[in-house]
Amino acid sequence: MPASPLTSLFAKSPITPIQEHMTAVQGTTLLLTPFLKAAMAGDWAKAKELQKQISASEKEADVLKKKIRINLPKNLFLPVPRSDLLELITKQDMIANTAQDIAGLMLGRKMEIPEKIAERTTEFLANSLDTVAQAARAISELDELLETGFRGREVTLVESLIKELDTLEGKNDKIEIKLRAALFKLEKDLPPVDTIFLYKVISLIGELANVSQGVGSRLQILLAR
Amino acid sequence: MEIIANYGTLLLVMACLAGFFMAWGIGANDVANAMGTSVGSRALTIKQAILIAMIFEFAGAYLAGGEVTSTIRKGIIDPMVLQDRPELLVFGMMSALLAAGTWLLVASMMGWPVSTTHSIVGAMVGFAAVGIGVDAVSWGKVGQIAASWVVSPLLSGVLSFWIFMSAQYLILNTENPFDNAKKYIPGYMFFVGYIISMVTMVKGLKHLGLGLSFGESALYALFGGLLLTLVGIVLMRRITFDQSAPSRFTSVERVFAVLMVFTACAMAFAHGSNDVANAIGPLAAIVSVVGSGGEIAAKSALPWWVLLLGGGGIVIGLATFGFKVMATIGKKITELTPSRGFAAELGAATTVVLASGTGLPISTTHTLVGAVLGVGLARGIGALNLGVISRIVLSWIITLPAGGLLAIMFFFMLKAVFGVS
């Protein structure tokens, strides 16, 4: 049978795979909640198990990312610029990487969170994960955006989702400042090296929200043209 | 003259076989392109698509295929040049059929995407220019045909772009796309019905002995459009909004799928009206020469059974091979949802039907490619492979001379076999 020009015209759409990638990324970050809980309880066996899961989940997202990139050769005709899509995936993937860094660092040093900031840290992580979830919500509208040709009503909807994402990230920054201040009060009584890494973990958790906001910004650039 | 008197029946049978073989090939391969978009977007199952294709391909071939057939038959080569040597016209047409058939067979085996239209036109120009003389070719008409190959994908692209944009504006980009779909889609159905009935009445009913004036046709076509709209409204009534669907466009797409059944009919009709001529145009020329005992009549009517033979060949091609090819193509075109597929099919079908009415042989597949690109330009499709355009151009560059050379070969072979100098 001759290869019909009509069938070779259709390339694999990157839209659904990008959404799947974001779902995988969010799945990775969600494992951080039980991980932090186990670490705080000092249950390092369980923490190790969860860290392994996080690592595996991150790899899964990585595979999806590579697949999307391979399926986006230069001569494709896309409804939005190819470079924007590639940057969007890179940003999404950074969220999963950050989650892996947090788990790896905490497990590697068997880090203990001082009791006085434990509750605040849990809240901080929860809010960061809310920000990730909001980014995922915005990304899950991509197929609807394609349905409406990346214009009109659906764009307005996504823009409002992105605005909410920015609000969540702003809230996250405030929690981070308070958490740092609380740690600062404690730091003279803590082992110095541990303290340095506590700051590092806090900034990594904050990074989850920052990169999620970055995903939102990429999406906005995608819509602006 | 002698040759035709002696071997007329043999030549006729050979021509019928060759023409039927071409029609069969069109049915087996080409139709799948025209209908693949419907199957891919799940608006139709393969069985339904084959059934629709059989009915509407045949109707298109029989009712609106006359004009293009006549172009292939006497538009490309000036038959008057051959008034004294009718056997050369018969041999030439025969070699064009054999050349196009052979080339399509070779291309199929090699997996090259070639167009039936380009093969047959290349073959006819080839044998006429070399075997008879450069003057035998109506270069003006050939230029017109070549231009139409560029214009038709462009036109269908522009049409599809605007059809899709209108669907966006009226339906998809609104607060309540489902209600608006039910409200505006009958309008598109009317358009489909109007175009098909108009072309049928202006071009098709003449040889059925029902000559209508343009004004009458336009009036009756209104009824055709309204009738189709009513059928569509009844069919759409069955679809209700599905609250549990993951996307709020799921139900909307289902309404579009009903519309796509209509555009699929239009596409099959359009395809039949244009592509069947590739197979039976040369056959018709041979039939008229042999039938009149060697007379090349400028104004001979097209025998009705020739169109039947072409339509029948397509239907049998569909029945024997269409299923498999349709399944393969349908699997590859899943990115085209009914709201896009309808726009592509409507743009392409309108363009092809217009070309059929004007008598221009164009490539349905290329027109459909243009239409899909038009929808893509309206930012409607996830990803399109632009490499296809260069492949199409490449297949032109190869097919035209290949068809021509093969035809020249067959022409001199036939002359040698029948001992004509």
Image (cartoon, grey):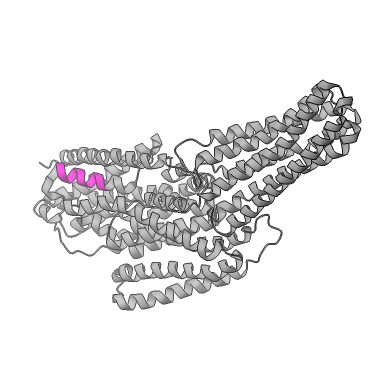
Asked if one can make out residue B6 in the rendered structure from this viewpoint, the answer is no
Position of A60 with respect to A151 (left or right) is right
Residue B113 percent across, percent down from the top left: 38, 41
Q: How far from the left and from the top, in percent, is residue B41?
A: 54, 53
Quadrant showing the N terminus of chain A: top left
User: What residue lies at 85% left-to-right and 39% top-to-bottom?
Assistant: A120
Magenta stretch secondary structure, dominant: helix
**Residue at 32% over, 43% down:** B101
Q: Residue extending furthest left? A: B84
Asked whether B17 falls inside the magenta stretch, the response is no
| Residue B200 can be seen in this image | yes
Above/below status of A102 relative to B233: above
Task: Give the residue at x 22% y 47%.
Answer: B124
Which quadrant would residue B225 be assigned to in this image? Answer: bottom left
**Towards the viewer: B29 or A32:** A32
Q: How many marks?
A: 0
Q: Nearer the viewer, residue B263 or B295?
A: B263
x%, y% of residue B89?
17, 50
Residue range of the region highlighted in magenta in the rendering: B121-130
- Residue B276 located left or right of residue A223: left
Residue found at x 58% / y 43%: A218
Q: Nearer the viewer, residue A64 or A177?
A: A177
Using residue B121 as the reference point, say whether residue A61 is left or right of it.
right
Q: Quadrant of residue A170?
A: top right
Up/down of B181 relative to B369, above or below: below
